[in-house]
Image (cartoon, helix red, strand yellow):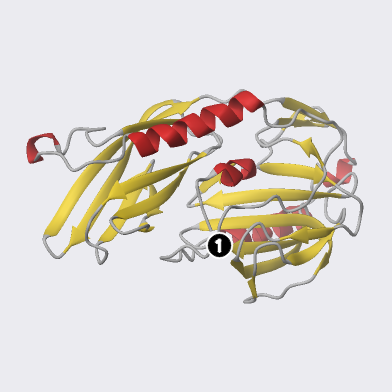
Amino acid sequence: MSTSTPPLPSDSWKILFVVCLLLASIFPIQIVPSAERNRPGANGHVSGKQGQVLWINVPISQPQAKVSGQFLKRKIPFFPHGDANFAGIVGIDMEDPSGIQELSITVNSDTGSDHLSYSVLILKEDYTIQHLTLPKNTVDLDAKTLKRVQQEKRELTEAFQNVGASPLWDGPFLEPVNGKVTGVFGSRRVINGQSRNPHSGEDIAAPKGTPVQAINKGIVVKTVDHFFSGKGVVLDHGVGLFSMYFHLSEIDVTTGQTIQKGEALGKVGSSGRATGPHLHWGIHLNGSRINPYSLTALPITN
């Protein structure tokens, strides 16, 4: 939903994110002597703001190795990337605690197991506050509607359970629609004077019926018609990365369908709890809610 126009992501935010990516590539994780192996942060350091996604390269010469990570109790799959590297995308949730946290990585290969430790400095993001006024019956829910909303939340949670071992994406990520951002990721929402959950996506205003494109190749894991989000599509891009497209007027794909990057999956609308036609674009990455625009800055080539 959208009633005001907070600013687009700032240039300074983008610059900081690019710097984080450069630091991660300049100082990649390295195997260290066994005496140092268990020391937190022994293999490298990187930083990022709440809501960002970090690309982490791990130099491993055995392509058959199994590599997995854990960050704030969230499992992070790693996948072969190039001749002697594995890569993983680590989401920093919008409400993860600021400060230094550990990314623990386990490498299993024919020669045995190894454990790596990466230090991640989480920087606090300054989120805006957005005041909204909506019809009372869409805010103060009766028992029947509340039961429906809770069931719909469980449906989405179930859709995120399947974590593919390999990425499905094809080159850089796109914006799903051209328009004006009217609801910024992370906004602290006050609805009818009541404090609510922060905004977990980007609202992009566009005329009703505007085609919405897939931000990258993926598989349709869910189409919905929910109370809050209206008609929507959830795409699985592999390795725990999912994109969401809500408030659609029409859905043009079916569950199980493979969709290519840039292919239309539906049309902009105002279904669900919305104040006007717009797209709610959200990203779920291995249990974290991240800023969708952080995907467009990932160092992915065709």
Look at 52% across and 24% down and name the residue there.
124
Secondary structure under tag 1 reads loop
Q: Quadrant of residue 102?
A: top left
Above/below status of 36 relative to 79: above
* Callout count: 1
Above/below status of 99 relative to 135: above
* Residue 262 place in picture, x, y as percent: 70, 62
User: In the image, is 31 to the left or to the right of 232?
Assistant: left
Q: Nearer the viewer, residue 91 or 155?
A: 91
Look at 82% across and 44% down and name the residue there.
179
* Residue 94 place in picture, x, y as percent: 56, 36
* Residue 61 place in picture, x, y as percent: 22, 57
Above/below status of 191 relative to 258: above
Question: Crowding at label 1, few (<14), some or many (≥20) Cα neighbours within 10 Å?
Answer: some
The N terminus sits in image quarter: top right
> Could one spot residue 154 in this view of the protein?
yes
> Could one spot residue 48 in this view of the protein?
no
Q: Mark 1: which amino acid?
A: Asp
* Residue 200 place in picture, x, y as percent: 65, 42
Look at 49% across and 50% down and name the residue there.
287
Q: Which residue is mark 1?
A: 170
Above/below status of 36 relative to 224: above
User: In the image, is 286 to the left or to the right of 295?
Assistant: left
